[in-house]
Amino acid sequence: MANRGEALEKYILSRCHADGYRLLSKTDPPVRIIRWLPGNQFKGAYLEDGKLDLTGSASGYHVEIEVKDCQGMRWPLSKLRKHQLQQMKDLQRDTALSGLALRLRGVHADDDYVYLIPARRVIDFIEAEKKSITLKDLQLLEEQGLVVHHIYSQQGSIKAFFKLVIDTFTED
């Protein structure tokens, strides 16, 4: 039950909270502990499918974002679980803001380069039966104004991030 995107999730949340967006939080699905392991770890099983990683509200919108941190130069769409895709579809239908925050560490030397992909674009990739999201895909979407990126820094403002979220997710 490893969460390889946990550090990125925590960082985004810390910036949100520091900038006054305290209504966004990490959501974990309920877990049944099967047995305890050394080092205060455990083996467990999910009791139900969870929501997307970050959920809450920002600037008057309900927001849910799935966070993925990838070591490579492409992100396999098979890593998006069926319930996560369905959640994005449901949120889009209900006019909430949802999407994918994706960090491709193999592409940029700067680990803090994160692409924000609206749910509609993620769904388009899957319906087109693409196997993965590549840098070329992201660059093409960025040229068309259909995906945004934001470089987080200690001085950066999460308010700018949410403006990008809202502008991007409300375009459809």
Image (cartoon, rainbow, N blue to C red):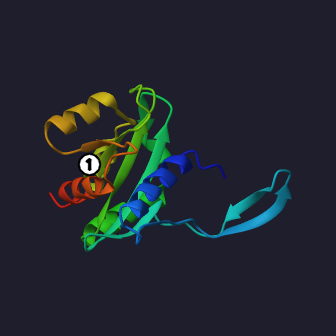
Query: Considering the numbered disc 1 on the image, is that residue within a helix, a strand or a loop?
Result: helix
The one of 38 and 153 positioned closer to us in this rendering = 153
For image coordinates 46% across by 57% down, the residue present is 14
For image coordinates 22% across by 57% down, the residue present is 163
Q: Is residue 86 in view? A: no
Q: Position of residue 59 (x, y in %)?
A: 25, 70
Horizontal relation, residue 33 to residue 138: left or right? right
The one of 134 and 42 positioned closer to us in this rendering = 42
Q: Is residue 147 in view? A: yes
Circle 1 is placed at which residue position? Answer: 121
Question: Which quarter of the figure is the C terminus placed in?
Answer: bottom left
Q: Position of residue 38 (x, y in %)?
A: 86, 51
For image coordinates 63% across by 70% down, the residue present is 30
In the rendered image, the vertical position of residue 142 relative to residue 39, given as above or below: above
Horizontal relation, residue 1 to residue 87: left or right? right
The one of 135 and 13 positioned closer to us in this rendering = 13
Which of the 4 image quarters holds residue 150?
A: top left
Amino acid tagged 1: Arg
Mark 1 neighbour class, 10 Å CA radius: few under 14, some 14 to 19, many 20 or more:
some
In the rendered image, the vertical position of residue 4 relative to residue 30, given as above or below: above
In this view, the residue farthest toward the front is 155
The one of 156 and 98 positioned closer to us in this rendering = 156
Q: Position of residue 80 (x, y in %)?
A: 46, 49
